[in-house]
Amino acid sequence: MVIRKIKPMAWLLLLVLLVLDGAVVVWGFAEEEIGFRDVDGTYYPPTGNFPDNRVSTIHDDLTYALALAAGFSVTASHTIRIWDQLVDSEQLPSTVVSYTYGNAGFYSPPNPLLSCGSKNHARQIWPAGEFNSTTSSVTSRYGPYSPFFHFPHRNGDDLKALHDWAWGITSTLVGYEAYAWARPLPFDLTLIQAIDNGGCAITRTVNISMPIQAGSLKAFATYLHSLDDSYSHQDCLTALVGTGAPWGTHTILVLGDTSIPACDYNPTAPTNDDAHGREFGSIYTDKVRTIDATRAVYGELSARSVQREGVYFPLPLTTTLIVSGTQRTLDEAITHFVTDQNFDVPTYRRQYADNLVNAITSTVRVSIDRLYLPIITK
């Protein structure tokens, strides 16, 4: 084996490339080493670098099973899980045309000369280099709305705004943009480093232009994704209090961040014991927030099913099912899905979710008979 020494400038270039390749983007319930499966069953295996072209078994597979359990039709359940996953993926393959979240336009970015005063603003570090206002989705993890959609606060105005827009209580989604600047290279490779060294970071409240209709099932799926993420990132948001971070972000040790265990996550090299890996398996207490998130999502799905699009009444979490040959309540099946295998065994979770779907669709259901009154006009 020949070991070549890497010169300091080469290390610097490598780090810069990592940053420009999205090393500081945010993931809630991180994508796993498993690809997308279309409605017709066509499987698109992962290609390229991790995490591109991967999906989350929480946002995709389990969401589909939960939607069916909540009483949605097969078609509606697929819509929910696809648009939930699209919040992260932006685009998913299909046999005809791909599913695309899209955008309805972005605002012009602020001028750092006017916004930053004496703070460092030589180089923009957020939105990230991968963001393109023409082609990127409004929910892009590289874009100005990334922390709003992916790092919402459990009891915050951000998640409430998403809830109200998703339910059609309001037709306008009020959120915020995030921008940050730092010193010239080679300094400040992450948001936290930039803030610690006099960088400039601002947010501004805006009406976010959405490419989908308020109150629609696609809008509701978008909200479910952010609801999940509010649990997934809750510990990290708490840990960031007092650090000066203006919004939620991960800490990436390879780029020089000081470790914050609740936030430590390198999206290009996930592990079973990083902030999102610990959300699965039986070892870590982080699994509790995954289970809590799933119950919260099921509660929202159940409420939506009864009030809007559902065809069956939701199954109580205490409903007994036979899943993979074992008798479990729906709630116990959710716990098993989360805890039985570690993060790096997504194929097991997908198979278990499929078995859960079979158990749900084999259960005798009570139909929702909706009364539609005629519109009387003079």
Image: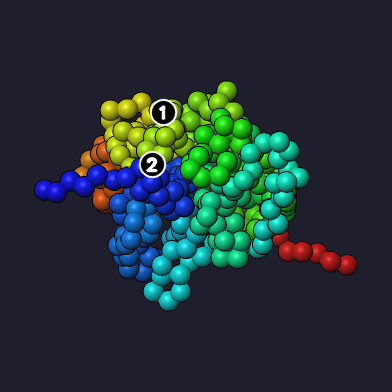
Q: What residue type is labelled 2?
A: Asn
Classify 10 Å Cα crowding around label 1: few (below 14), some (14-19), many (20 and above).
few
Percent position (x, y) of residue 328? Answer: 29, 37
Please state, as top left, top right, bottom left or bottom right, where the C terminus lies in the image.
bottom right
Q: Mark 2 and mark 1: span between their CA atoms? A: 12 Å
Residue at the extreme left of the image, as rendered? 1
Q: Residues within 10 Å of mark 2 (few under 14, many from 20)?
A: many
What residue sits right under mark 1 in the picture? 259
Q: What residue type is labelled 1?
A: Ser
Q: Is mark 2 on a helix, strand or loop?
A: loop
Q: How many marks?
A: 2
Taking the image as shown, residue 104 lies to the left or right of residue 78, namely right
Colouring scheme applied when the structure was drawn: rainbow
> Quick one: 255 or 53, which is closer to the camera?
255
- Tell me the residue at 56%/30% (across/down): 196
Q: Where is residue 332 in the image (x, y as percent from the top left)?
A: 33, 35
Task: From the top left corner, tell me how far across and down residue 163 is, in percent.
Answer: 63, 44
Q: Residue at x 48, y 31 (%)?
A: 236
Q: At x 73% / y 38%, what residue is drawn?
A: 117
Q: Which of 357 and 135 is in front in this view?
A: 135
Which quarter of the figure has residue 7?
A: top left
Residue 129 makes an appearance in the image? yes
Residue farthest along the right direction in this orientation: 378
Label 1 residue SS: loop
Q: Is residue 355 above or below residue 201?
A: below
- Mark positioned earlier in the residue sequence (2 or 1): 1
In the rendered view, would you say 260 is above or below 190? above
Which residue appears farthest toward the top when viewing the image? Answer: 242
Q: In this view, does 291 lie to the left or right of 343?
A: right
Q: Residue 266 carries which label?
A: 2
